[in-house]
Image (spheres, rainbow, N blue to C red):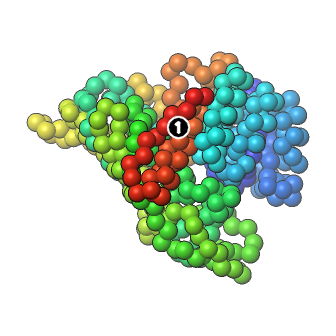
Amino acid sequence: MNEIGAAVIGTGFIGTVHLWALRRLGVRIAGVLGSSPGRGGERARALGVDRAYNSLEEMLADPGVQVVHVTSPNHAHYSQVKSILAAGKHVVCEKPLSMTSGESAEMVRLARDSGRVAAVCYNTRFYPLNQQARGMVQAGELGDIRLVTGHYLQDWLAKDTDWNWRLEPEAGGVLRSVGDIGTHWIDLTSFITGMKPVQVLAELTTFIPERRKPVGPVETFSRSQGATEPRTITTDDSALLLLRYPNGAKGSVAISQVNFGRKNFSAWDIAGSAASAAWGAETPDHLWIGHRDGPNQILQRDPGLMNGLGREAASLPGGHVEGFADTFFALFRQVYGDVAAGGRQPGSTYASFEDGHYEMLFCDAVLASAREGRWVDVRETTT
């Protein structure tokens, strides 16, 4: 891995998580690109990175960079990814892939034509027990999927003094809770069940229509301080979604960034014709398995007790909890294995640009449903 050079665009919370995982993997860090040369240099020094690029062009001209990680605000993904692929680099892009489905459709085409590895960072797939659950569904252990339910709840935007660039449609998109964390849940449950929702009925709510925006910059998940100014909010604080799947299965999910005490609680419950399974991010090393005619089970993450998919995603022995940061390590380990192999391999399970494009189509359907008060098809487009 140390023969592959990586650069990271973005030096905030999630960019730092990417750097941690890359270092653990043994990838050589060529440099970072901040929101400004000054910011980039400051963060590079704080993170122990030798080089801060002054521009994207300077980064892409560096022959020591083979892979670029895009962790910038959503509005920058489209133009940055286009430039990265045009420069012949592999790319790992944070979600959502773009601001619109038109942009994401073009990004799919460009990635396909480039022949480069192109991944979307839906990291929750790589909690080992989520990979385990996918393997169970593929093996028929749950039977035919009937009902998919769950939630994704946070509290970091629960006060009118909480602020982040995601609140601004021009930076984060017109959907906020759905685009930011709801797509994580949709991607994860689609990955596990092997089915993507084909119709959605959505209700969006903005509980805090006016917030206090700090005059200075604010880090993600930090508490704002100092002088503020009032700003009208139009993006969604929460969403309630009903789902229909191609095999006739149904689903529902509650999404919120204003639930006090829920820091980052994603959970799903999948009911099949033979058994059920459930998992939650607050206890990520435990998978509940439900039976009708026998005792229920709790599978504690242990490579020796798991199926092939689960075992491959695990890094530590049973009883040694693997959490949020470990999912990035597992994801990048697979991505960089494909980079070394020259392209995506048949057994790879990370989200593709096609998956990222589907999420943008799903967001289109959510917006249309919320505005029109009806079921809306999630329409696949020709890419």
Q: Say left or right for 123 vs 52.
A: left
Q: Quadrant of residue 30?
A: top right
For the C terminus, the image quarter is: top right
367 sits left or right of 266 in the view:
right
Q: Nearer the viewer, residue 180 or 67?
A: 180
- Pick the residue in front: 361 or 376: 376
- The image shows a total of numbered marks equal to 1
Percent of width and height locating residue 290: 21, 40
Q: Up-down: is 383 above or below 176? A: above
Tell me if 349 is positioned left or right of 213 in this view.
left
Q: Amino acid at mark 1?
A: Tyr
Vertical order, 309 against 365 (above or below): above
| Disc 1, SS | helix
Residue 320 at least partly seen:
no
Residue depicted at x 48% and y 47%: 365
x, y percent for residue 152: 43, 55
- Quadrant in the picture for residue 231: bottom right
Looking at this view, name the residue that lies furthest to the left: 293
Q: Residue at x 84, y 43 (%)?
A: 56
* Residue at image point 59% right, 57% down: 174
**Quarter-wise, where is residue 209 in the image?**
bottom right
| Residue 29 location (% of width, % of height) | 76, 38
Which quadrant, please, contains the N terminus?
A: top right
**Crowd class of label 1 (few under 14; some 14 to 19; many from 20; radius 10 Å):** many
| Residue 57 position (above or below residue 85) | below
Q: Where residue 366 sits: x, y (%)?
A: 47, 51
User: Circle 1 is placed at which residue position?
Assistant: 358
Left or right of 49? Residue 280 is left
Residue toward you, 319 or 195: 195
